[in-house]
Image (cartoon, rainbow, N blue to C red):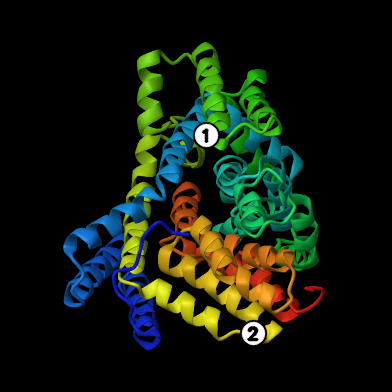
Amino acid sequence: MFPISPKHNPSLGESILFFIFTIGLISYFLIGLGTKPHIPIMIAIFILVLYGLLKHIAFKDLEEGMTAGAKSGMGAIFLFLLIGILISSWMISGTIPVLISTGFSLIGGTWFYAIVFAITAIVGVSLGSSLTTTATIGVAFIGMGSAMDASMAITAGAIVSGAFFGDKMSPLSDTTNLASTIVQVDLFEHIRHMSLTTIPAFIISFILFVFLSPNEAITVENLEAYKSSLDATGLIHWTSWIPLAVLVLATILKMPAFISIGVSSVVATILASMTSGLVWSDIWSIWFNGYTANTDFEPVNSLLTKGGINSMLFTISLVILALGFGGLLFVTGIVPSILQSFQKKLKKVRTIIISTAATAIGVNVLIGEQYLSIMLTGETYKGVYQDAGLSNKALSRTLEDAGTVINPLVPWSVCGVFIADVLGVPVLTYLPFAFFCLISPVITILFGGKALR
């Protein structure tokens, strides 16, 4: 369970009212005022601290709750810093440019969104990480979509959908392993059982992306302008494929994501020092500030100017705030109150499934943390499923259907802020087109009562 003990026991009505108030506050600032999500979350933190003090919770306990909440995301924060280096090193080694150029050669405008979705899903299953998939092949696809004058919202939606299909179905995925471990289900049995809802969600999503894809292929002149400008950067060499191969090999060998990304980044950096003509002082600067392209074709400059540790600081600061806020929700007893109330009142199978999904979604929305949505919901409902005669694999499947895939749809969540930053498309912009993420919980709620026992 979450390592924060509540210091207050509010009523269910009080907890739900605060939940509604918080979501309303954040939505008003994001949608109504157009502010960055940092602002409403900081205001919500102030309000929650005041609430805690009025309930006679010591400020030291509130501070420890915030710190413990932020500490739970330190693994992701270090990974974000490394991914900033990965993107910049893959730029100067030519890995991302060669992926974009190859994509232009293989993919026309027809069925573009559907192909993006399918390829990203395949890469996602291979890598087992939605964030790594988004930061690598996703960046390449968003660049191709920009060059093709495709909708950035739909392109990003296809990337997110494919990446999180992979995150659900890959045996290498952290969330897939976590969900199966929490409720003690064999990993591959868990994946097989998830296919009952995941495959239909994939098929429906693919059809929707086909329907939305442009009917006409992109003009050759525009495509050639991009390809020639990419070649003119001097970044593309045969060695540009090596960092990608290293990342895939490290993943096959089941190295931790941090090690895999680090090794690939170092290999890419060494190759760049030999092929790009950059001196080491420039390379270290690019590690921090990202790569800045300087060609005669401005669209390519915009396409390749990315990466660096500095580009991740916006994301990291928001993650710290959101998880600190989540810690406050626990120490004040608001989240535990809601979870305990759900746990006590569930008897019918349909109600249990709906409540499980709603809890996983609610934890994502309130706390913004993917792993916690799985851990907290799994721990809360294990006894409920056993008492109702439901199998553990039914719980593990529901955790992924409504926990894993919802995180990228929350603007202040760990995945949401990362993806919006890396792809340059706001969460609320791509959300309506992240079909797989939207459809998965709907299918598990509608048909969750089937084959559960």
**Residue at 21%, 69% in the rendered image:** 57
In the picture shown, does residue 197 fall above or below 340? above
Q: Nearer the viewer, residue 442 or 423?
A: 442
- Identify the residue at image location x=80%, y=66%: 196
Query: Judging from the image, what secondary structure is the residue with disc 2 in?
Result: helix
Residue 221, can we see it? yes
Residue 97 vs residue 221, the one in the foreground? 97
- Closer to viewer: mark 2 or mark 1: 2
Residue 354's tag is: none
Q: Nearer the viewer, residue 387 or 314?
A: 387
Amino acid type for the residue under numbered disc 1: Phe
8 relative to 155 in the view: left or right = left
Residue 189: x and y, percent?
Answer: 79, 55
Q: Horizontal and vertical percent for residue 267?
A: 56, 20
The residue identified by callout 1 is: 258
Which amino acid type corresponds to the residue marked 2 in the rendered image?
Answer: Thr
121 in relation to 440, above or below: above
Whole-angstrom CA distance, mark 2 to mark 1, is: 39 Å
Quarter of image, res 345: bottom right
Give the residue at mark 2: 351
Q: Picture coordinates of residue 105 (x, y %)?
A: 73, 38
Residue shown at 66% from the left, 33% from the top: 254
Residue at image position (60%, 56%) is 160
In the rendered view, tell whether residue 92 sits above or below residue 209: above
- Using residue 180 as the reference point, say whether residue 375 is left or right of it: left
10 Å neighbourhood of mark 2: few (<14), some, or many (≥20)?
Answer: some
Of label 2 and label 1, which has the lower sequence position? 1
Query: Can residue 218 be seen in the rendering of this structure?
Result: no
Q: Nearer the viewer, residue 109 or 154?
A: 154
